[in-house]
């Protein structure tokens, strides 16, 4: 009988041990008064991260409980919930953006909790789980500032365009709004005409918001100026959440594209060494958000047209083959991979694809930057570089087009052995396709932020070109969570080798 009792006791102890190892046993960990005070402080700060305080226990309710099982359980659950939200984001990004393919991140939150209790660092541990990127810090500061501005907001009001030389109440309101935005150093007496100081401040506001910087307050500018204070505050919250989705380590040397800002940045050592204007996908060809490693670049590329974009040129080969050939296009037999003379094509039975040889009119331009991904999206040049002068640049068929592509190519190749600027230029000028495999792959992050910090740490707001903010804000406010949510190596592109490369075609 005694042996059976001891056996039963051993079983109980074993189960208790398993529960502790699985994390369930942590519900009985004792929380000291210091631990509770730290957690209450962290819960009182959740709004500065753009999170909704109602989604967590109220700090005063937690501190009002007497020590014991109930308080320890509530504290543990609150810590784990907040830790997950700060580390990974409250919303699973795939819930809102099905194309999201950033690598998943794993945290042992039970171990993190146990360590925080042991080291008496509950508050610091939770704060340390949030992103430490300067943009995240700037957005938190802006969120606090926006809360203070909620009552001070001065609307300009819709009406006629406001231009230099005009005066009146709406000009006074415009001056007050720009002063609130920190773009004017001082106010002026009521009735002061629209002067050069005001015009310069408005131009800065327009440039920050990706508007035509003409110094005239037209309909689009007035809409941005009069955006409701709550909308701006929510916009900051949405972008804080986006930062929580992003990997903490973007790479010592990496490329970052902000789609909403039409901006590509080449980063090294924590600094943006190069900034390029970019174009993004339009309409139904919106560029997705994802991260992959760039493994090679192709100078003077061949364009393997996707079936949809190549269809018009297939028809052109049947009706006006001379024009298609003069434009650098060629007809390729899908079965043999060989170039076909359009005059001898078997249009009734043949299966053909259109490619475009390197040249000044090639849709890929002079170079494409390849980071193989399931979306078939890449960064490349374009023959239509005049489009970079537009304010809004959603002109591509899904890929990211980049301005000054040779400078970006050199930024990449200068980290590779055996390359000089002169040798790179020689390859460009030769006009033949040259593939360069990278010994040091470069991480590429395609992101979407509608509120970003500038080099002075001030936040500027960007037009939500893909209309993604409202859905994210609604999800953040909802009670339920989202569903869980090298040595140079080259190959010349000849007709015989083009079939092997056809799997790497990009949509442009």
Image: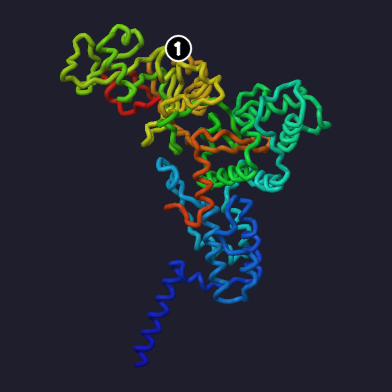
Q: Would you identify the image quadrant in which residue 336 lies?
A: top left
Q: Nearer the viewer, residue 27 or 489?
A: 27
Q: Is residue 460 above or below residue 479?
A: above
Q: How many labels does the image show?
A: 1
Residue found farthest to the front: 159
Q: Is residue 144 above or below residue 45?
A: above
The location of residue 281, given as percent across then percent down, is 45, 29
Q: Nearer the viewer, residue 76 or 348?
A: 348
Q: Quadrant of the C terminus?
A: top left
Q: Nearer the viewer, residue 306 or 2?
A: 306
Residue pictured at 34% horizontal, 93% vertical? 1
According to the picture, the residue beneath numbered tag 1 turns out to be: 429
Q: In this view, does 101 lie to the left or right of 195?
A: left
Q: In this view, does 187 lie to the left or right of 446?
A: right
The location of residue 207, given as percent across then percent down, is 64, 27
Residue pictured at 31% horizontal, 21% vertical? 310
Residue 486 can be seen, yes or no: no
- Crowding near pointer 1: few (<14 within 10 Å), some, many (20+)? few
Residue 174 can be seen, yes or no: yes
Q: Classify mark 1: helix, strand or loop.
A: helix
Residue found farthest to the right: 189
The location of residue 293, given as percent across then percent down, is 44, 36
Q: In this view, does 471 lie to the left or right of 164?
A: left
Render colour scheme: rainbow
Q: Which of 21 and 226 is in front in this view?
A: 226
Q: Is residue 220 left or right of residue 348?
A: right
Residue pictured at 47% horizontal, 55% vertical? 481
Q: Is residue 183 above or below residue 67?
A: above
The location of residue 268, given as percent across then percent down, is 57, 34
Q: In this view, does 11 lie above or below 480?
A: below
Residue found farthest to the bottom: 1
């Amino acid at each position: 009988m005694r042996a059976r009792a001891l056996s039963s006791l051993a079983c109980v102890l074993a189960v208790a041990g398993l529960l502790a190892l699985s994390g369930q046993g942590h519900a009985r960990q004792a929380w000291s008064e210091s631990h509770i005070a730290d957690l209450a402080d962290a819960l009182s700060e959740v709004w500065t991260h753009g999170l909704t305080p109602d989604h967590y226990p109220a700090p005063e309710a937690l501190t009002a409980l007497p020590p014991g099982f109930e308080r320890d359980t509530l504290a543990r659950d609150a810590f784990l919930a907040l830790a997950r939200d700060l580390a990974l984001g409250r919303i699973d990004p795939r819930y809102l953006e099905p194309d999201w393919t950033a690598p998943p991140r794993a945290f042992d939150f039970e171990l993190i909790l146990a360590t925080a209790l042991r080291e008496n660092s509950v508050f610091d541990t939770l704060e340390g789980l949030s992103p430490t990127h300067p943009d995240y810090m700037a957005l938190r500061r802006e969120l606090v500032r926006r809360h203070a501005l909620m009552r001070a907001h001065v609307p300009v009001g819709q009406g006629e365009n406001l231009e230099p030389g005009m005066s009146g109440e709406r000009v006074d309101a415009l001056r007050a709004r720009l002063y609130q935005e920190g773009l004017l150093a001082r106010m002026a007496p009521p009735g002061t005409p629209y002067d050069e100081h005001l015009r310069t401040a408005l131009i800065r506001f327009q440039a920050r918001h990706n508007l035509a910087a003409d110094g005239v307050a037209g309909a689009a500018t007035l809409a941005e100026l009069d955006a409701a204070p709550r909308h701006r505050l929510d916009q900051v919250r949405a972008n804080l959440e986006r930062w929580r989705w992003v990997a903490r380590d973007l790479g010592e040397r990496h490329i970052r594209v902000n789609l909403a800002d039409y901006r590509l940045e080449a980063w090294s050592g924590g600094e943006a060494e190069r900034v390029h204007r970019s174009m993004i996908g339009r309409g139904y060809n919106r560029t997705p958000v994802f991260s992959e490693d760039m493994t090679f670049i192709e100078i003077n590329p061949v364009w393997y047209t996707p079936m949809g974009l190549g269809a018009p040129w297939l028809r052109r080969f049947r009706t006006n083959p001379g024009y298609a050939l003069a434009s650098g296009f060629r007809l390729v037999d899908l079965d043999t991979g060989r170039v076909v003379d359009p005059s001898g094509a078997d249009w009734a039975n043949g299966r053909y694809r259109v490619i475009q040889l390197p040249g000044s009119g090639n849709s890929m331009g002079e170079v494409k930057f390849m980071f193989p991904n399931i979306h078939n999206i890449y960064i490349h040049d374009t023959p239509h570089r005049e489009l970079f002068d537009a304010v809004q640049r959603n002109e591509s068929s899904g890929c990211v087009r980049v301005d000054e592509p040779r400078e970006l190519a050199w930024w990449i190749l200068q980290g590779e052995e055996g390359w000089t600027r002169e040798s790179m230029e020689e390859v460009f000028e030769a006009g033949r396709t040259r593939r360069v495999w990278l010994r040091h792959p470069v991480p590429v992050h395609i992101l979407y932020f509608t509120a970003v910090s500038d080099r002075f740490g001030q936040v500027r707001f960007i037009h939500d070109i893909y209309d993604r903010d409202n859905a994210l804000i609604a999800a953040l406010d909802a009670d339920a969570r989202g569903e869980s949510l090298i040595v140079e190596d080259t190959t010349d592109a000849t007709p015989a080798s083009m079939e092997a490369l056809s799997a790497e075609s990009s949509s442009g």
